Amino acid sequence: MTVQTFDAVVVGGGPAGATAARDLAQRGYSVLLLDRAGRVKPCGGAIPPRLIKDFEIPDDLLVAKALSARMVAPSSARVDIPIENGFVGMVDRDQFDEWLRARAADAGAVRRIGTFEHLTRDEDGLYVVHYAARTRAGNKDAHAECVRARAVVGADGAKSAVGRAAGVPGAERSDYCFAYHEIIRVPQVKPAGYDGSRCDVFYNGKLSPDFYGWVFPHGDTLSVGTGSADKGFSLRGAVGDLRRIAGLEGGEVLRREGAPLPMRPLKKWDNGQDVVLVGDAAGVVAPASGEGIYYAMCSAQLAAEAVHAFLQTGDASALKSARQRFMKLHGTVFWVLGVMQWFWYGSEKRRERFVSICNDKDVQQLTFESYMNKRLVRRKPMAHLRIFMKDMAHLLGLVRV
């Protein structure tokens, strides 16, 4: 039986995989988007204006618009930060991801439901992608199928099976943490101070020893979650505590979702031949903030351009450009956020001081400008100097909190 050949097979239908599939299909390549379907990644669902603009996200896909953020310290001290001159869009990942997959199909990508199993080489050197195919999501009856691929894009999340099968360096031992959230219905009797346009972030070791807890608005529902790299830490118990703290213990639980998240970008995203990783598989979740949707879609866009160059020239070194360009654009931000998470999330005392720093107007303005536009703000040297001096004062304990 003849095995169908595609220019590119994209494994994984999240934001990264759907974006890569769409971009390649728009360039006229034959593309298979393979997604196991029926599973939603735990995610607060925040997308910045830069993503909405760059990837043409329609307004009706936003289930809420966040106009402010509340930072909550271990002592329960609060800092409210308005989002000036804009908003942060909130999406439900089940709807958002499916819309992206459908858009990829509209561009010409072939969609199939299935679970990736392994790779083999054909006699002419092309990869054969083997998968367990299903007729619909949740169907337990699966049958073995395979396709050939001139290039493979691994968008199958942290601990990427594609990366490991293709021998991408570091894919077999990538560092990761775990995230867990509950989608709950907003209670009819809302807790005191409830604001459906505010994102609440809790810096508290009881809710996460090395990250934070969140309560993010999704219109009629809320995402309540946390994450940690501590394997002995009870994420589900912490979310229960967070719901009580936030006055949401009476909210009906609609979904519970958990998944591993990468802690840093892999040092290499390709296998030097015909496979490139994107999104969580490549490790592009921002430290400290845990933001991943924008970076996943950006990495996929760059990877699609790299695959295009590879398919046009046959030069496998073209695949390196995806990581090189991504790190040139965002590497500094990832480094700064990594240092921030390592230091400020290290103890309750430091978390308390971190929230106190967030009360500073210079910090608020530069932080949100950087977040909203996805670049470090460099045009205000005096503001950076003031922030540096204030940070040093907090580090040395010269500021009372």
Image: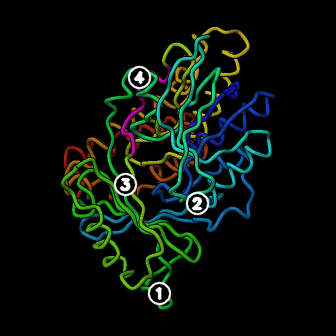
* Residue type for callout 4: Lys
Quadrant in the picture for the N terminus: top right
Residue at the location (31% across, 69% down)? 77
Residue wearing tag 1: 190
**Nearer the observer, disc 1 or disc 3?**
3
Rendering quarter of residue 243: bottom left
Residue wearing tag 3: 179
Quadrant in the picture for the C terminus: bottom left
Residue at the location (39% across, 20% down)? 169
Residue wearing tag 4: 267
Between 91 and 108, the residue placed more toward the observer is: 108
**Nearer the observer, disc 4 or disc 1?**
4
Residue at the location (75% across, 45% down)? 105
Gap in Å between the C-alphas at discs 1 and 2? 25 Å
Magenta residue span: 261-270
Gap in Å between the C-alphas at discs 4 and 1? 46 Å
Q: Are marks 1 and 3 in contact (CB under 8 Å)?
A: no
Residue at the location (39% across, 52% down)? 259
Residue wearing tag 2: 94
Helix, strand or loop at disc 3?
A: strand
Helix, strand or loop at disc 2?
A: helix
Question: Alpha-carbon neighbours of circle 3 within 10 Å: few (<14), some, or many (≥20)?
Answer: many
Find out whether residue 125 is within the magenta segment: no
Q: Is residue 363 above or below residue 165?
A: below
